[in-house]
Amino acid sequence: MSINRCSYCQKRLIRNLKISEILFFTPKISQICAECDSLFRLLDQERGCRTCQQVMNTVNDHCDDCLEWKKRYPEYDFCHHAKFYYDVAFKEWLKRYKFMGDIRLAGTFAKYWQEAHGIFADYLMCPIPITKERLNERGFNQVTEMLKVAKVPYQQLLKRPKNHLPQAQKTKQERLASHQPFQLMVDPSIIEKKKILLVDDVYTTGQTLFHAADCLLPYFPGKIRTFSLARTTN
């Protein structure tokens, strides 16, 4: 039997372990109760854009944003995966975790990070970095902290030297017009021919993840894919 607490509501979590978990000492991490888990709406995979999961009411395979991205990055075979709608429930969770600094919430989506790690098992998982100023202000990188709690391996390939206005405080036009904020922080040989999964908390316009991919592309990665817990919808 495993006894834990829901990282969101702090209620006790009691679960009977499977025989395989006991024998191999690999209990699955669950840090959210069923009631809290139901607060977050999974994206409708059938109605989404085939490359970014933007919800669409048309029969087109690709949204207008992705068609525009393809013009800007014609050599980049991009594809984004996300789990949840960026709705009121997710915004409330993110406010408490990221902006109010409740680090206990880092485990809320542990099972979904583990799921992503399983799907992209042969990829280097690279979280989007934050600046030293932002790290000192917040006390933690919201993405790497979630990966640590979920016990998902990752490698920091990029750094973000300068502090800019947070993406949440920018308009869509300002985000799309922003300059490259990232720099490579590892030897290029680590990237060459490797599959890389760039991960972030929320996908809005996609500009942050495209900047990150653009920073890696000159070093000949085998493939780049992106993942976020949530994504906004038009």
Image: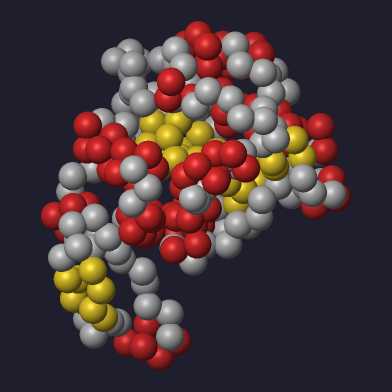
Pick the quarter of the image with the N terminus.
bottom left
Residue at image point 37% right, 39% down? 99
Residue at image point 66% right, 14% down? 72
| Image coloring type | secondary structure
Q: Position of residue 118 (x, y in %)?
A: 49, 59
Judge whether residue 70 can be spotted in this image.
yes
Residue at image point 25% right, 38% down? 92
Quarter where residue 155 is shown = bottom right
Q: Position of residue 103 (x, y in %)?
A: 38, 55
Front residue of this view, candidates 195 and 40: 40
Residue at image point 60% right, 57% down? 154
Task: Determine whether, in the image, residue 137 is placed left or right of residue 159.
Answer: left
Is the residue 207 above or below the residue 171 in the image? below
**Total residue callouts:** 0
Task: Determine whether, in the image, residue 191 is placed left or right of residue 173.
Answer: right
Task: Determine whether, in the image, residue 56 is placed left or right of residue 120.
Answer: left
Front residue of this view, candidates 175 and 29: 175
Quarter where residue 3 is shown = bottom left
Judged from this view, the residue extending furthest toward the bottom is: 23
Q: Position of residue 210 (x, y in %)?
A: 61, 27
Judged from this view, the residue extending furthest toward the top is: 173
Is the residue 165 above or below the residue 58 in the image? below
Q: Position of residue 8 (x, y in %)?
A: 24, 55
